[in-house]
């Protein structure tokens, strides 16, 4: 078995290959662990690599989930945590589909508002954020009308 | 333009044409009162935090149109104190009333209320976020003295002085002025300047924005000078507060260099930032401004209730 995080030899796989499932690649290194927490269920087999070299973003993270694809909610959360990541579907060790993280027009019930005085932090109500800028991703709370960089938000 | 059933939550929800329509109807109501327009209609005022000024203005507007008013103005007496959710309070009140006016300390509370209410909700202030009827009455006040604002013509110079960082009324009015031909002059103490993104948005809307170093300079350059309160809690150093308070205090002497037609506005209540000797000058407009809240709120009530 290869060392899962040997980055010095690019021909050695940096993170264990999976037979079937989902690979999230090009995660900003500081978001990797939050992405892993977002996508992993209790019974999932997960492989995490972080601070790997990337020609595109410098240091990156990779998260691989065996035998499963992401649900709508997880994709929405991923769009907030790592909008520039890519998502690949793996079948029989081969990439059958590779797409950028789909960023929706709005996020309902995905993240908490970072404004402590926002009504959504005091009443039981579904939060809503509208995308106001795609690159870099910024969203505005539908209720308190404050604009946030996605790094300021915590997922529910 | 159909406003029937519409909520009035944020100035950002309104186009230039809609704003003009509201101002025009306010003018008509001021010139020609309609004491029976809303006869038989009931307005509920839900003030989860006190604001005597806003509540009285809304109530006066409703009474002058022949409508009636119920509500509470003391948060201690409201069901929210007993743990009822805001949504449930609204679902109860919309069984009684034809229109709801609310003020609430949380940002976004009025938007939330509008999502459950079966009747129109008018936002009378939601925390630090919005107070749209204040913005409409500010625009109405400016347009009364300077019809060129809405009729077109040379750009009007509107100055803002004082705390431009935290002032909700300033932010909303600056955003709304983006619909019109206006140059902005900003005079703020260090640390209390208008946040960059409001300046950027104003420039994108085509407004010329100039920041000046002193209140006196703003006085001499403006057609309209919008003054705001300075709040001590924004200053970590009490000595600095005293110093800034003195340099951002408008006096009659300072107005000697102003244009004869220049008007001074203030959302009230004022504390020290406008000396009493300004009241008697031709420039003072802040009390008329408060009065203008009534026809503007009349127009909004008439519109959302489908009577105008
Ligand atoms: Zn919010």
Image (tube, coloured by chain):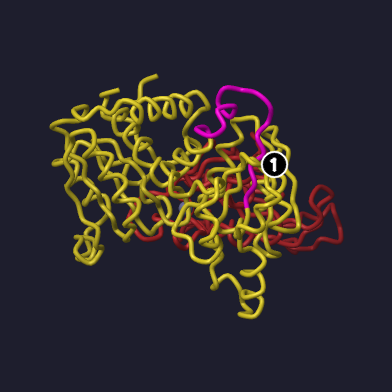
Chain colours: A red, B yellow
> Foreground: B137 or A43?
B137
In the figure, B217 relative to B36: above or below? below
Residue at x-position 59% and y-position 31% = B179
Question: Picture quarter containing residue B189?
Answer: bottom right
Horizontal arrangement in the rendering, residue B21 relative to residue B41 (left or right): right
In the figure, B68 relative to B267: above or below? above
Q: Farthest residue in the right direction?
A: A9
The residue carrying mark 1 has its beta carbon less than 8 Å from ligand 1: no
Horizontal arrangement in the rendering, residue B67 relative to residue B200 (left or right): left
In the figure, A57 relative to A48: above or below? above
Number of residues whose C-alpha sits closer than 10 Å to that of mark 1, classed few (under 14), some (14–19) or many (20 or more): few
- Determine if the magenta segment contains residue B83: no
Q: Position of residue B166 (x, y in %)?
A: 56, 59
Residue at x-position 55% and y-position 26% = B150
Residue at x-position 65% and y-position 23% = B153
Quarter of the picture containing the N terminus of chain B is top left
Residue at x-position 50% and y-position 37% = B139
Quarter of the picture containing the C terminus of chain B is top left
- Determine if the magenta segment contains residue B153: yes
- Secondary element type, mark 1: loop
Which chain does the residue under circle 1 lie in? A
Residue interval drawn in magenta: B143-160
Question: Picture quarter containing residue A61?
Answer: bottom right
Horizontal arrangement in the rendering, residue A70 relative to residue A89 (left or right): left
Residue A94 visible: no
Q: Position of residue B6 (x, y in %)?
A: 34, 31
Q: Position of residue A112 (x, y in %)?
A: 47, 56
Q: Position of residue A45 (x, y in %)?
A: 54, 57
In the figure, B13 relative to A28: above or below? above
> Foreground: B166 or A51?
B166
Q: Which residue is mark 1?
A: A135
């Amino acid at each position: 078995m290869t060392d899962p995080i040997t980055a010095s030899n690019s021909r050695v796989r940096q993170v264990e290959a999976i037979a079937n499932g989902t690979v999230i690649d090009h995660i900003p290194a500081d978001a990797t662990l939050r992405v892993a927490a977002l996508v992993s269920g209790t019974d999932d087999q997960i492989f995490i690599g972080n601070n790997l070299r990337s020609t595109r973003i410098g240091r990156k993270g990779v998260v691989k989930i065996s035998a499963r694809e992401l649900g709508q909610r997880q994709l929405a959360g991923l769009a907030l945590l790592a909008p520039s990541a890519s998502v690949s579907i793996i079948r029989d060790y081969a990439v059958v589909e590779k797409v950028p993280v789909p960023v929706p027009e709005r996020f309902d019930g995905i993240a908490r508002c970072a404004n402590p005085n926002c009504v959504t932090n005091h009443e039981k109500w579904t939060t809503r954020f509208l995308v106001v800028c795609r690159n870099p991703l910024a969203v505005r709370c539908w209720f308190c009308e404050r604009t946030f960089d996605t790094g300021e938000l915590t997922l529910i | 333009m159909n406003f029937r059933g519409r909520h009035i939550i944020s100035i950002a929800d309104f186009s230039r044409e809609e704003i003009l329509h509201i101002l025009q109807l306010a003018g008509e109501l001021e010139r020609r009162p309609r004491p029976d327009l809303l006869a038989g209609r009931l307005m509920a005022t839900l003030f989860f935090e006190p604001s005597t000024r806003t509540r009285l203005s809304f109530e006066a507007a409703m009474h002058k149109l022949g409508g009636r008013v119920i509500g509470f103005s003391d948060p201690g007496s409201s069901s929210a104190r007993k743990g009822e959710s805001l949504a449930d309070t609204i679902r109860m009140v919309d069984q009684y009333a034809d229109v709801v006016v609310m003020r609430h300390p949380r940002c976004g509370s009025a938007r939330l209320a509008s999502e459950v209410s079966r009747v129109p909700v008018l936002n009378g202030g939601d925390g630090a976020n919005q107070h749209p009827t204040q913005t409409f009455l500010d625009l109405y006040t400016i347009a009364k003295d300077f019809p060129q604002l809405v009729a077109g013509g040379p750009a009007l110079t509107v100055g803002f002085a004082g705390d431009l960082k935290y002032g909700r009324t300033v932010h909303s009015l600056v955003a709304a002025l983006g619909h019109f031909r206006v140059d902005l002059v900003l005079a703020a103490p260090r640390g209390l300047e208008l946040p960059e993104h409001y300046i950027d948005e104003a420039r994108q809307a085509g407004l010329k924005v100039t920041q000046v170093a002193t209140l006196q300079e703003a006085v001499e350059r403006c057609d309209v000078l919008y003054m705001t309160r300075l709040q001590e809690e924004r200053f970590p150093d009490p000595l600095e507060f005293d110093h800034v308070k003195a340099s951002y205090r408008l006096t009659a002497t300072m107005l000697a260099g102003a244009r004869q037609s220049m008007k001074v506005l203030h959302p009230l209540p004022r504390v020290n930032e406008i000396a009493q000797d300004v009241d008697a000058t031709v420039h003072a407009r802040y009390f008329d401004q408060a009065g203008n809240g009534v026809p503007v709120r009349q127009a909004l009530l008439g519109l959302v209730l489908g009577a105008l």
